[in-house]
Image (cartoon, grey):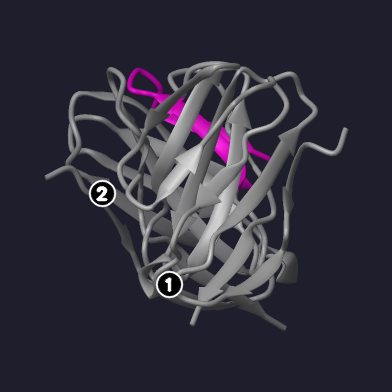
Amino acid sequence: NAGVTQTPKFRILKIGQSMTLQCAQDMNHNYMYWYRQDPGMGLKLIYYSVGAGITDKGEVPNGYNVSRSTTEDFPLRLELAAPSQTSVYFCASSRGTEDFYTIYFGEGSWLTVV
Amino acid sequence: KNQVEQSPQSLIILEGKNCTLQCNYTVSPFSNLRWYKQDTGRGPVSLTIMTFSENTKSNGRYTATLDADTKQSSLHITASQLSDSASYICVVRLSGNTPLVFGKGTRLSVIA
């Protein structure tokens, strides 16, 4: 079991460029999430999905898009990168609702926009 | 505004000593409270999950307590080890379809 796998680990983008952060989980979890963690701040939810074909916005969705075509994969797309998107991004998954289930996090993707 | 406040912001202790980290929250209605450990450069790892009806839960040398009346939780680490050096994050789950609310974390450094 690899758990939650994110790629790339590190990336530098120029302002206005676009990129996709990849996320895959092999635990057959229904729920998947994308969070960002800014220095000295708590994690903030960007987008989440409760199953293949279903996605919904979190607290800070502006500038991002997601898709969930399979149970395993949940890529995060950054369009027209801005310096405010410099952050650490964490993908996560859980078997079910956050009311009862443990959330498993990936190792993070460090993104710098210059 | 829903908030989760953690204290202290950072802490340095000697190996083998005990320590207690605090979490105060103002969120409501409340479903559950979690503690996560985040090593530098890694993703958070779950330590404990407590519902509002539970007041203590242990995971090895980690013991979390919860007082839902005063909206306070603590994480007690016994006989600290160098590998306990990490950030410890308190996370609260509201009832209903709302995102988890994450604290900013307490940075613990255990030194020899």
**Looking at the image, is A81 positioned above or below residue B96?**
below
Label number found at residue A92: none
* Residue range of the region highlighted in magenta in the rendering: B45-62
Q: Chain of mark 2?
A: B
Q: Mark 1 and mark 2 in contact? Answer it, CB < 8 Å.
A: no
Q: Position of residue B25 (x, y in %)?
A: 23, 44
Marks counted in the figure total: 2
| Camera-nearest residue between A114 and B18 | A114
Question: What residue would you read off at disc 1?
Answer: A39
Residue shown at the point (47%, 31%) measured from the top left: A48
Residue shown at the point (28%, 17%) measured from the top left: B96
Residues marked 1 and 2, same chain: no
Number of other residues with Cα within 10 Å of mark 2, as a class: few under 14, some 14 to 19, many 20 or more: some
What type of secondary structure mainly makes up the magenta span?
strand
* Secondary structure under the numbered disc 2 in the rendered image: strand
**Amino acid on which the number 2 mark rests in the picture:** Asn
Asked whether residue B57 is drawn in magenta, I would say yes
Q: Position of residue A105 (x, y in %)?
A: 63, 43
Residue shown at the point (35%, 37%) measured from the top left: A58
Residue shown at the point (40%, 75%) measured from the top left: A83
- Which quadrant is the N terminus of chain B positioned in? top left
| Camera-nearest residue between B64 and A72 | A72
Q: Position of residue B64 (x, y in %)?
A: 48, 41
Residue B18 appears in the figure: no
| Camera-nearest residue between A108 and A71 | A71
Left or right: A76 in relation to A3: left
Question: What residue would you read off at disc 2?
Answer: B24
